Image: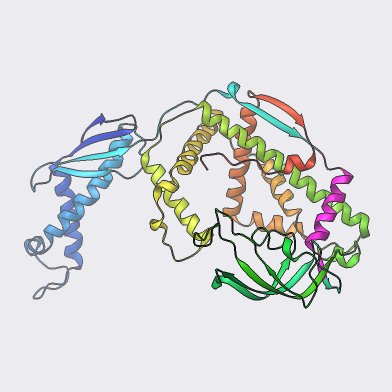
Amino acid sequence: MQVSVESTSALERRMIVGVPVERIETEVNKRLQQTARRAKVPGFRPGKVPMSVIRQRYEDAARQEALGDLIQATFYEAVVEQKLNPAGAPAVEPKSFEKGKDLEYVATFEVFPEFTVAGFESIAVERLQAEVTEADVDNMLDILRKQNTRFENVERAAENGDQLNIDFVGKIDGEAFAGGSAKGTQLVLGSGRMIPGFEDALVGAKAGEERVINPTFPEDYQNLDLAGKTAEFTVTVNSVAAPQLPELNEDFFALFGAKEGGLDGFRAEVKKNMERELRQAIKSKVKNQVMDGLLAANPIEVPKALISNEVNRLRVQAVQQFGGNLKPEQLPAELFEEQAKRRVVLGLVVAEVVKQGELKANEERVREMIEEMASAYQEPEQVVAWYYKNDQQMNEVRSVVLEEQVVDTVLQKANVTDKAVSYEEAVKPAQAPQAA
């Protein structure tokens, strides 16, 4: 087998492969002999058909099959011989494809980039330091109570925060418009659910009252036919209900699975969950900074095939997330190209850090991660056992741990500064990277 390789760009390779005719004929004859053992030809017993008849009937198909298999086999033999690392399937073009002659074909493909990850010292990381205070726990208890607010009908005039049950009919220039009318709508005043001015105009209304209000649709309203126009809504208030926060009692604690320990036990459980969230938030923000730093310090060219594959994965994820009748291929590729490129580059850089550092997932850290995730459940032992019986889940956890070890490797040389902040600031989501 003869092989020659030409670099047509930084990552593209054009490889010419020559396969001797003797190897081709050997493969063709092998297939014809296999066919002869099972072929059913009128006038002959199975396995007794003359080879001349077999060749006459089946040689063309056997040759096509042999050539296809040979191209596949010799391509991988050639890239191993040339120490190439293809990043995708090749585009194959036959140069010589005649019976009785050597096979020669051209395979064009991209290879993975070869590089060394560097620049750890140039990466700046701000590591947040925070703790969960009793005031933070008090605030979280208030949030949990508000999330479980109940509304009870009252006879007084409506205030901000009250829930109104309303019927309304909207018109513009005396004509009703699509989506402008509804019956039995529940609306919490001050929630910002309706267009500006709508909710404010209902403050002070009482059950049974009818009001005519004239809010204006925003200039940037999604329905361009309504944007910037002033509407007239006739609103009937069916009922006014005031918010009632639940008491911190056994019934409330039971909503969250806390059946023992009273208020002190519930506070302790809430604090434990907040501390877990805090650890994860700080870890995530450090990781994001490290990954951004690795990308900035290691600009590399990546194969188009890998970006295309990642674009397709993102298309599928988008369809799964947002539903509808769209097919993934209907979504424009350019919507996902920047994000796909970022993910591909980051994947290659992280893999190279793992390779250079000879990193392997630390099984003790794997166990700790599983136990921490399991601690959020009522029966953590069962969750831990489930993970250890599920190879796919275990591999996913090992991948996360390995990424954490990559972060630790970078932090050893990066420029790290610690910053003391409040719990609220520490858990606040970081702004997503522009490319994402």
Colour setting: rainbow
Q: Along the line of sight, which residue is nearer the eye, 340 or 330?
A: 330
Above or below for 240 versus 338 = below
- For the N terminus, the image quarter is top left
Q: Which quadrant would residue 304 be assigned to in this image?
A: top left
Residue 87 appears anywhere in the view: no
Tell me the residue at 88%/57% (across/down). Answer: 266
Q: Position of residue 257 (x, y in %)?
A: 81, 63
Above or below for 39 versus 381 = below
Tell me the residue at 81%/65% (across/down). Answer: 149
Count of all numbered marks drawn on residues in the image: 0
Asked whether residue 133 is drawn in magenta, I would say yes
Q: Along the line of sight, which residue is nearer the eye, 262 or 359?
A: 262
Tell me the residue at 46%/56% (across/down). Answer: 316
Left of 92 or right of it: where is 355? right
Q: Residue furthest front?
A: 173
Q: Which quadrant would residue 128 be assigned to in this image?
A: top right
Q: Along the line of sight, which residue is nearer the eye, 215 or 220?
A: 215
Q: Position of residue 22 (x, y in %)?
A: 14, 43
Left of 277 or right of it: where is 26? left
Read off the magenta span.
Answer: 131-151
Query: Of helix, strand and loop, which mostly describes the magenta segment?
Result: helix
Asked whether residue 383 is drawn in magenta, I would say no
Q: Position of residue 278 (x, y in %)?
A: 75, 43
Above or below for 369 versus 114 = below
Q: Position of residue 216 (x, y in %)?
A: 61, 59
Tell me the residue at 16%/57% (across/down). Answer: 62
Residue 148 appears anywhere in the view: yes
Q: Which quadrant would residue 154 be assigned to in this image?
A: bottom right
